[in-house]
Image (tube, rainbow, N blue to C red):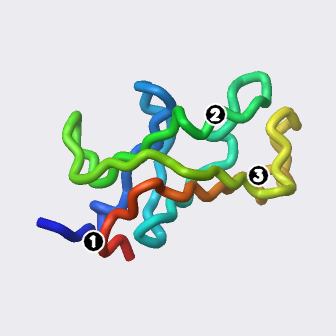
Amino acid sequence: RDDIFGWEAVGKVMVGEASYCTGALIAPDLVLTAAHCVYDDEGNRHPVAEFTFRAGLRGDHFISESGVAAVAPHANYQPTKALDADNIRHDVALLRLATPIPSAT
């Protein structure tokens, strides 16, 4: 099968080998996730090379996998700020995949 539809567009954002956050394909090469997922506990951005997205994840199996070429958290998200309505509103990020996943939308 060479397409991704429905629930299969939901997957895991991995940082290194650790399962980190949920993400959703919104285009063949774009994943929507939370901005807090791209930062470590001290508020530093994880290196782009450490990210992987696994689409259609069920247990330990997934349909497709891609590295990440670029990470773009919302400009107004502040990773070290206390949770408040304004910061939560900006808690979104886009990941541009290194290899597009066909028919993701």
Query: Comparing marks 2 and 3, which lies closer to the viewer?
Result: 2
Q: CA distance from mark 1 to mark 2?
A: 29 Å
Q: Would you call the spot at circle 2 few (<14 residues within 10 Å), some (14-19), or many (20 or more)?
A: few
At horizontal 65% and vertical 40% (from top left) the residue drawn is 38
* Residue farthest left in this picture: 1
Residue 68, position as x, y percentages in the image: 50, 48
Residue type (three-letter) at the residue carrying disc 2? Pro
Amino acid type, label 1: Phe
Image quadrant of residue 100? bottom left
Q: Which residue is mark 2?
A: 47
Of 77 and 28, nearer the camera is 28
- Give coordinates of residue 33: x percent, y percent: 57, 53
Query: Counting residues from the N terminus, which is met first, the one under dot 2 or under dot 3?
Result: 2
What secondary structure is found at the residue carrying circle 3? Answer: helix
Up/down of 43 relative to 12, above or below: above
* SS at badge 2: loop
Q: Is residue 77 above or below residue 50?
A: below
**Which residue sits at x=23%, y=46%?**
62
Which residue is located at x 76 percent, y 57 percent? Answer: 74
| Amino acid at dot 3 | Ile
| Mark linked to residue 5 | 1
Viewer-nearest of discs 1 and 2: 2
Closer-to-camera residue (74/66): 66
Q: Which is closer to the viewer, label 3 or label 1?
A: 1
